[in-house]
Image (spheres, coloured by chain):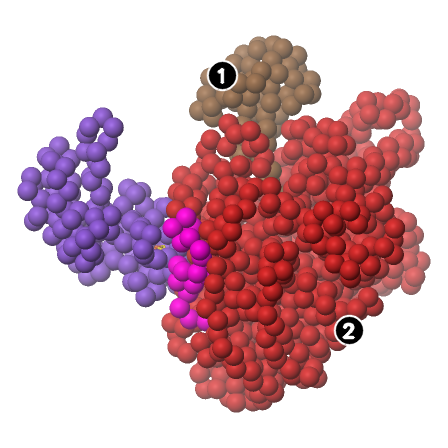
């Protein structure tokens, strides 16, 4: 860490390009009622009012982001077009301190890998502090010509665009420097949050953003990631080095809710539930999300070797008992105040063994399940230290761990199958389990050299390069390259759950589990056997989970702990008591009086709007919902034979094909015809339930019914009717 | 023969709820169990027998990030 | 460390302690703001609830607003507290208090005013010892040992 003097020297090199002073509104019932527009090309900064219609129809968070982005771009806007924006917002409930999981920021942009809208949900203090500084959302447009930062100081009520030529780019250094630079004194550091990317995001298209918080209890910076879809790459492409927000004085009524009492009561009830139940249920407070490693392994759902398999003998090396020992215990690890679920686990005093920071002792934020499975089991790396090192470097370089894990797993399979060799990789032996190779490749991404330049582009572009330049069979690459819409799959094997295949690929942004996770309901519980059942689940759950993103909420406290009497309720999978909590929170904050059903309606507006947005950008139709076959069934002989009994049974019982005496190739082919047909039927049912055409276009009557039949939206839809 | 979540599973004498969960390798902690529609308390898994012909539901809550 | 010990068998349910606490500590006439709560249960017995200064709340507080003062009493630094109420939900005895007029919780400060005021001697000021909490043991902000070498 630089000394105070060095910080001063660095800061003295800042050249303020624009300053904007504003009257800070008092937050009223969860809204600041204005959004902040910053153009880093023209250096224009202005305030835009939040209309009642915006609140009624788009609620906040991801809804506001999308509405702002929609008006900023045109049909041909690409990820690196100057008019593309990065929008950040929490929602009306965001910034509540009394209930767990109420501090999320939602980030949207047009993605470099999916070339349509991406949204990401992230912890850290930025979104709430932004709102308390007077802004419901921030939109950043244009491309700067030199390295800049944007500083929002809620206490001074100013926004500045400043050049920042000397600060290093990598997150773990930069976020600490800027926190120290803009905090008035040591105690003020908790009032500062920094958004940054890293060197990797400059050369890769799978860049992520890191949102910081100053952890009082650890006395240091923590970072949470807006990982998916390359938002960090857009950030660095705009020459944005960082965003800084500072807002002192967060208190229990900063969000100025309509009924503080109901919020307090609901919050206390939830804290109590976590206190009494968590240690008997998922142990989020002590092991965080990695408790899922052993669970997924037991159900054959943990991705191993590029999603070929669902379990591995070495899994015990990376299960939660290991992480329990490595995570520092006993510290409140929420990513916003009041999150007693405290899943944001951390490994302290980790000594790096590779790369530019080799030998340094660092704090590693994580790993989360997705990271441990992605850079770990999916790449055959069952080694906690390697997972931590990859986790750390992905974060500080600004590279999405999920996309990195899935991409490297794909590359390793290509290598093992001889599709690529050392000549292509520049000597890297990209075999499953080769942790040194995965790390070296990551460092190459950060340095912008060698095979790293290809690896950082994400699977969709890599497939094309391998086919065009290295003569690979594109059909095979399409089967095993785990991406849909250009986004890499997150870390669950969906082969045995048709509903989850839809949960992954019939999405707006691409295969990320935060829309729907239906594997247990479908595959294990057998609760949604028919197409109609699956379609209903793929209607309800994505909408339910969209709502978290409208309000600045985390999904985890919804169902990663449940009330003791939840099994006795009518729909345990929905966790009715928690649904009621959220109704109370929303009404308590906004003073409105919505019902459970209106939650779904609120989401439906934004969800269908996002679909139309994608259609406007030339995507969003049925063909873009196609999935790689590996998400549905065995692609290769080895995959089939490893689960031969299961697949033979399916052929007999479901397909009506007698596997007796047939070759594996014949059986593979028969199973594939069946599975692909099932998926097409699923699409039909789901689109129908969602009120869309067979081509996945929201019908005009659907748009009317939900009240978003704005002429500009209808006009896009009409092109496809 | 019993059914677990609507699928046939072999029955053996002396089978308890806890034994069945183990047999199925259902290690996920957020589950609940009904036998012929009756909810079984967690504390009773060890002592509750599963009889031949029972329809058992072992419902897993939604998991996943 | 001195804490308030309750003897419900001696309590006459006059609620003098609550009124005294509200008045002297919270400067209010509203007994709902008292740091001690006396309730009559359905079976007619008396429940007396007040913080025993165990300090477990110190560990769950995200801001470090909870601390033990020199005499050993657990106090809340209201300037730092963000009113998240984690401490309320996690208090093993349910003695961290809230009120709709407040944005921060409140609790017994072991001043002894209620003890003196109780006409029935149902309250006593006693000496107690507790296991130090995680943050009391270590240097807050510098947790953990070095990363175990066996994982390399
Ligand atoms: S549950 Fe975890 S991710 Fe969600 S808000 Fe709490 S600490 Fe953050
Ligand atoms: S309410 Fe205040 S004292 Fe209690 S845990 Fe939250 S911040 Fe700490």
Question: Observer-nearest residue: A387 or A200?
Answer: A200
Q: Which residue matches tag 2? A: A81
- Left or right: A377 in relation to A215: right
Provide the major secondary structure of the magenta segment: loop
Q: Which of the chains is red?
A: A
- The subunit carrying tag 1 is B
- Left or right: A625 in relation to A573: right
Q: Which of the chains is brown?
A: B
Secondary-structure class at tag 2: loop
Distance between the alpha carbons at the discs numbered 2 and 1: 65 Å
Q: Do labels 2 and 1 share a chain?
A: no
Question: Where's residue A344, x and y in %?
Answer: 51, 54
Question: Observer-nearest residue: A696 or A402?
Answer: A696
Crowd around label 1: few <14 · some 14–19 · many ≥20 (10 Å):
some
Q: Mark 2 or mark 1, which is nearer to you?
A: 2
Secondary-structure class at tag 1: loop
Q: Chain C is drawn in which colour?
A: purple
Question: Where's residue A571, x and y in %?
Answer: 57, 31
State the image quarter where residue A671 is shown: top right
Residue segment shown in magenta: A247-264
- Left or right: A445 in relation to A216: right
Q: Which residue matches tag 1? A: B48
């Amino acid at each position: 860490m630089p000394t105070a003097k060095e910080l001063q020297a660095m800061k003295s090199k800042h050249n303020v390009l624009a300053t904007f002073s504003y009257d800070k509104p008092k937050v009223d019932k969860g809204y600041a009622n204005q959004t902040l527009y910053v153009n880093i090309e023209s250096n224009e900064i202005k305030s835009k009012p939040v209309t009642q219609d915006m609140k009624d129809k788009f609620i906040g968070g991801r809804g506001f982001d999308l509405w702002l982005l929609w008006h900023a771009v045109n049909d041909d806007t690409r990820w690196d077009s100057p008019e593309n924006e990065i929008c950040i917002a929490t929602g009306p409930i965001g910034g509540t301190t009394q209930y767990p999981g109420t501090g999320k920021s939602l980030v949207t942009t047009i993605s470099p890998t999916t070339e349509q809208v991406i949204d990401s949900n992230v912890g850290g203090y930025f979104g709430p502090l932004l709102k308390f500084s007077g802004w419901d959302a921030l939109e950043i447009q244009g491309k700067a010509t030199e390295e800049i930062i944007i500083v929002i100081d809620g206490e001074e009520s100013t926004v500045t665009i400043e050049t920042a030529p000397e600060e290093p780019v990598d997150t773990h250094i930069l976020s600490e420097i800027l926190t120290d630079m803009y905090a008035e004194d040591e105690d003020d550091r908790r009032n500062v949050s920094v958004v940054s990317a890293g060197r990797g995001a400059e050369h890769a298209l799978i860049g992520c953003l890191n949102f910081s918080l100053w952890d009082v209890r650890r006395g240091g910076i923590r970072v949470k990631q807006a990982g998916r879809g390359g938002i960090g790459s857009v950030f660095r492409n705009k020459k944005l080095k960082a965003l800084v927000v500072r807002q002192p004085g967060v208190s229990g009524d900063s969000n100025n809710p309509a009924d503080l009492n109901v919020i307090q009561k609901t919050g206390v009830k939830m804290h109590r539930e976590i206190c009494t139940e968590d240690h008997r249920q998922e142990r989020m407070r002590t092991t965080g999300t990695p408790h899922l490693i052993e669970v997924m392994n037991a159900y054959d759902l943990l991705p191993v070797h590029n999603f070929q398999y669902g379990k591995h003998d070495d899994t015990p090396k990376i299960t939660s008992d290991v992480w329990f020992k490595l995570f520092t215990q006993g510290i409140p690890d929420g990513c916003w105040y009041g999150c007693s679920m405290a899943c944001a686990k951390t490994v302290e005093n980790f000594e790096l063994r590779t790369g530019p920071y080799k030998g340094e002792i660092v704090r590693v934020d994580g790993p989360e399940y997705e990271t441990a499975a992605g850079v770990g089991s999916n790449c055959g790396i069952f080694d906690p230290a390697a997972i931590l090192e990859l986790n750390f470097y992905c974060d500080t370089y600004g590279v999405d761990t999920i996309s990195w894990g899935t991409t490297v797993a794909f590359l390793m399979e290509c290598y093992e199958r001889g599709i690529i060799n050392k000549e292509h990789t520049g000597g890297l032996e990209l075999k499953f389990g080769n942790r040194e190779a995965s790390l070296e490749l990551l460092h190459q991404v950060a340095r912008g050299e060698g095979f790293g330049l290809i690896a950082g582009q994400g699977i969709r572009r890599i497939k094309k390069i391998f086919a065009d330049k290295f003569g690979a069979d594109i059909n095979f690459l399409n089967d095993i390259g785990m991406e849909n819409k250009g986004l890499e799959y997150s870390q669950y094997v969906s082969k045995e759950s048709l509903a989850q295949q839809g949960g992954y690929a019939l999405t707006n942004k691409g295969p990320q589990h935060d829309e729907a996770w239906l594997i247990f309901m479908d595959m294990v519980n057998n609760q949604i056997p028919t197409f109609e059942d699956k379609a209903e689940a793929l209607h309800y759950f994505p909408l339910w989970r969209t709502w978290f993103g409208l309000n600045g909420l985390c999904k985890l406290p919804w169902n990663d702990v449940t009330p003791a009497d939840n099994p006795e309720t009518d729909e345990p999978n929905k966790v009715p008591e928690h649904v009621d909590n959220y109704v109370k929170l929303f009404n308590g904050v906004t003073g409105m009086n919505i019902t459970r059903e209106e939650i779904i309606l609120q989401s439906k507006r934004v969800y269908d709007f996002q679909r139309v947005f994608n259609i406007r950008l030339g995507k969003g139709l049925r063909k873009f919902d196609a999935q790689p076959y590996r998400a549905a069934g065995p692609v290769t002989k080895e995959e089939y034979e490893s689960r031969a009994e299961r697949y033979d049974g399916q052929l007999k019982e479901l397909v009506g094909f007698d596997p007796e005496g047939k070759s594996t190739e014949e059986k593979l082919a028969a199973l594939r015809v069946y599975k692909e047909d099932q998926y097409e039927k699923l699409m039909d049912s789901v689109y129908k339930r969602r009120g869309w055409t067979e081509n996945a276009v929201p019908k005009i009557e659907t748009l009317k019914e939900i009240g978003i039949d704005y002429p500009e939206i209808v006009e896009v839809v009409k092109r496809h009717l | 023969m019993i059914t677990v979540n609507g699928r046939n599973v072999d029955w053996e004498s002396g089978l308890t709820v806890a034994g069945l969960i183990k047999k199925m390798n259902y290690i996920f902690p957020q589950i609940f169990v009904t036998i012929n529609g009756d909810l079984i308390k967690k504390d009773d898994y060890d002592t509750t027998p599963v009889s031949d012909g029972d329809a058992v539901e072992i419902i897993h809550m939604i998991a996943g990030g | 460390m001195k804490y308030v010990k309750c003897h419900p068998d001696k309590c006459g349910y006059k609620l003098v302690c609550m009124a005294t606490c509200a008045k002297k500590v919270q400067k209010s006439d509203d007994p709902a703001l008292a740091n001690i709560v006396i309730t009559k249960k359905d079976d007619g017995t008396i429940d007396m609830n007040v913080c025993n200064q165990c300090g477990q709340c110190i560990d769950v507080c995200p801001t470090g607003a909870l601390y033990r003062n020199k005499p050993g009493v657990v106090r809340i630094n209201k300037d730092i507290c963000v009113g998240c109420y984690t401490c309320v939900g996690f208090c093993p005895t349910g003695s961290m208090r809230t009120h709709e007029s407040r944005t921060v919780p409140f609790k017994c400060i072991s001043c002894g005013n209620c003890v003196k005021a109780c006409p029935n001697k149902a309250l006593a000021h006693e000496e107690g010892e507790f296991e130090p909490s995680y943050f009391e043991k270590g240097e807050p902000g510098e947790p953990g040992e070095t990363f175990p070498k066996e994982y390399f």
